[in-house]
Image (cartoon, rainbow, N blue to C red):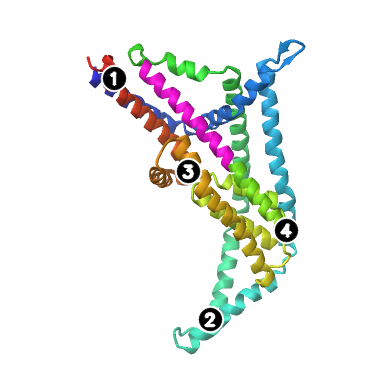
Amino acid sequence: MKNRFFLAICASVILLVFSAWYFSNIFIYLVISLTLTTLLRPLVNFIGRIQVFGRRIPRAIAVLFSFFLLITLISSFVLLFIPLFSEQIQVITSLDFDNIYNSVSKPIASLEEVLISNEVVENKEGFLVDSLKTEIIKKFDEVDIAGIINRFLSATGSFFVGLLAVSFITFFLLYESGILRKTIISAIPNQYFEVFIAAMFKTEKLLSNYLLGLLFQMLSIFSIASIGLTIFGVKYALTIAVFAAFANLIPYLGPLLGASFGIVVGLSTMGSFDFNQEAIILIVKIAAVFGVVQVTDNVVLQPLIFSKSVKAHPLEIFIIIFAGAAIGSIGGMIAAIPVYTIIRVTSKEVYSGFKEYRIFQT
């Protein structure tokens, strides 16, 4: 019995991993849809309980209204970036590239002079500047404009296909509440029913807590960053805060990305790229705000989310995140904790089943 059970488990895991790899696009759509379903289900249930003229709002309308609120929220975030992008385009088009080239070539010429005077190199004067100019021209010549346009159109098409797929899957997961759970339960053999139901229930609870914790983390980071940057008078404070909140989904690397984006936006909106006292003060202000964000995230938010919601030790989380990074880069880092939670809870429940349920001891 035990051998057959282990073989069944191994075969199921191998089949699941192979399916996720072979149908990677569908698997990604399903994961995104499950995440959106988990976040939107409380709102859909709340709307569905509202009565109008003594009758409850149909679930389909509740789902569509939840979609409308989600789209409105995302659109609001996107609109925050439009003025920033518009200003950056104006800044780039107004740049005097001759002055920039001269500014860059001056320190290179000084380095050249030092190398030649100390007989470190035997080249003639101007060899570094000429090399820089040659490399820049070469890089521009290598740019495939047609290829970039084709890749952009292909990516745009793939994005809209993915958007339609995720919307379709999420709608039916919300409309037919519990359809995926019922499908999985119907496939479980009766003798293993208790073990897998317990594992599935605990996994759903932990993942729900984790997603709600991430949402709380993003809102907290957005609030701290936006308030701090606004107090210091940094332009596009809300836009920088939104980017920082989403970037923080990437463990350890996210705060650095948010701070870097804030500094770049802050410097570019000054109207000058001169590294003067005003620029240094601005960098210090932005770095101070993100220092507070980082301390709050590390001391309060991450222990609350990781240790409490998924019930794992911080060192355990650290190792799992970097293992995910080694396997799947940034996507692996983001998915590491949910995947590890599923594996850990399922393994623990199966092990407990072997010890407690008589069906495994025969």
Magenta range is 194-217
The crowd level at tag 4 (other Cα within 10 Å; few <14, some 14-19, many 20+) is few
Compare marks 1 and 4 and give the one earlier in the sequence.
4
- Cβ–Cβ under 8 Å for marks 4 and 2: no
The residue drawn where x is 55% and y is 68% is 135
Compare marks 3 and 1 and give the one earlier in the sequence.
3
The crowd level at tag 3 (other Cα within 10 Å; few <14, some 14-19, many 20+) is some
Q: Badge 3 is on which residue?
A: 303
Q: In this view of the protein, which residue sits in the foreground, 327 or 39?
A: 39
Q: Is residue 251 magenta?
A: no
Q: In this view of the protein, which residue sits in the foreground, 362 or 183?
A: 362
| Secondary structure beneath label 3 | helix
The residue drawn where x is 61% and y is 76% is 105
Compare marks 2 and 3 and give the one earlier in the sequence.
2
The residue drawn where x is 57% and y is 77% is 129
Is residue 90 placed above or below 177 in the rendered structure?
below
Q: Badge 4 is on which residue?
A: 233
Q: Which amino acid lies under the numbered mark 2 shown in the image of this protein? A: Leu
State the separation of the CA atoms marked 2 and 3.
49 Å
Q: Badge 2 is on which residue?
A: 111
Q: Badge 1 is on which residue?
A: 356
Residue 267 placement (x, y as % from top left): 67, 63
